[in-house]
Amino acid sequence: MTDRAIVVRYGELFLKGDNRPFFERTLEQNLRRAIGDLPGARVDRLHGRMLVRASDPAEAVERVRRVFGVTSVSTALLCRAELDAVASAAVACAREAAAARPTGRAVTSQGERPSFKVESRRSDKRFPLPSPEISRRVGAAIVEALGLPVDVHAPDLTVGVEIGTQATFVWSGDLKGPGGLPVGTGGRVLLLLSGGIDSPVAGWLLQKRGCELAAVYFHSFPYTGDKTREKVTDLARRLAKAQRALPLHVVHFTEAQKQLRAAGPGEIAVVLYRRMMVRVAGAIARRDHIGAIATGENIGQVASQTLENIACIEAAADRPVLRPLLTYDKTETMALARQIGTYELSILPYDDCCSLFVPEHPSTRVRREVAEAAEAKLDVAAMADELARTAELVALSGCLTPSAGT
Ligand code: ATP
Ligand code: MG
């Protein structure tokens, strides 16, 4: 066993009553999956924290800091629950933290050594000293060994001491996690995933709120080629990293699109395609017991996404349509896409099936009656069921499992 560990903190504010054990259990499982393939991997649930161990702590930190629900992580040194051992671990930790400050800042801008404070938590009441006294004594040891000044109000470094029944450890410095809720605590959502910038970001935001995703992609071969399909699969794979697995349903949409295009005036074609997409997604969701569907739609971004057209599309849905990006500026969405690593994939050139067979100026105000009148020429319910039934399933394994490397 290594003497290093990772302290994982999570938001507690909203954790009340029965939710708490469920939240913690799910987070623990997700952390286990995130590091499961590392030698020496181990996750312990302590009071209000998780302690993660692995023989490669640097790699483990990189992985656990991306797990939803985690607010921050720190590397820690484990030690015996004795004051001397705690003090020397704290000195080692403070020395490392001072050295790890950005180049040129091992001393502060004023040319001083970095100031510090010690924060102690003693949940094992068998330890003979109360927390303030632990902080004082450990602080004195750091002053003596390293000559760092104490500043309890605005320290450059914080050294944490935690003395618990299961483990005693010392940490310094922390890295922010993504926050949110552990994936799996928020139910399942079927994401309409295109090859664009928006829908993968919408999926990521839902995962951040604890939702586990399945995805559906509407493929119009040969108008949208294999490259587009590969790109969507890669995007889905990126989202799968936060889950155990992610089923991607590929719907063969070409014939349906042609029939829809022929059924009404060209100006309403995009809205007819979208109405069919939510119907098919609804059929898949019904079969797979998924409560809601989601899109990357956004108010006013393109002609098909006016409030009127969104209302007309929504009317064809049989369950809630979640739109996490509804109010985002494109620049905000793009920044998030870069941060989560989908942007580079999304901007690869691709064909968009919704731009197939449509005039240059699609209607921004498709009335429901007009859409329904066009659809009355077809059996849209049967078409949707058939498209859902014949969709191809691509089972993507999550990177949170040891076997996943895709
Ligand atoms: P995106 O960047 O996600 O494609 P967008 O701004 O390009 O979004 P549209 O192309 O109008 O917007 O699509 C709106 C939403 O409809 C998408 O975010 C996605 O959820 C869904 N969608 C569009 N085309 C497809 C498709 N071929 N397969 C699955 N979903 C799709
Ligand atoms: Mg698009």
Image (cartoon, rainbow, N blue to C red):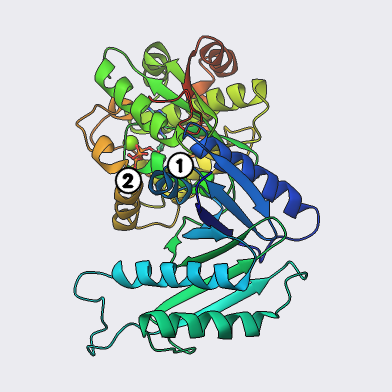
Q: Residue at x 44, y 36 (%)?
A: 239
- Badge 1: residue crowd in 10 Å (few <14, some 14–19, many ≥20): some
Q: Is residue 119 above or below residue 260?
A: below
Residue 313 seen in this snapshot:
no
- Which residue bears the numbered disc 1? 55
Residue 117 place in picture, x, y as percent: 48, 82
Tag 2's secondary structure?
loop
Q: Indicate the quadrant containing the C terminus: top left, top right, bottom left or bottom right.
A: top left
Q: Residue at x 26, y 81 (%)?
A: 107
Q: Indicate the quadrant containing the N terminus: top left, top right, bottom left or bottom right.
A: top right
* Label 1 beta carbon within 8 A of ligand 1: no
**Amino acid at pointer 2:** Val
* Label 2 beta carbon within 8 A of ligand 1: yes
Mark 1–mark 2 distance (CA, rounded to whole Å): 50 Å
Horizontally, residue 106 falls left or right of residue 62, namely left
- Which residue bears the numbered disc 2? 302
Q: Residue at x 73, y 54 (%)?
A: 20
Please, which residue is most extreme toward the front here? Answer: 84
Q: Is residue 65 above or below residue 345?
A: below
Residue 327 place in picture, x, y as percent: 43, 57
Residue 102 place in picture, x, y as percent: 25, 69
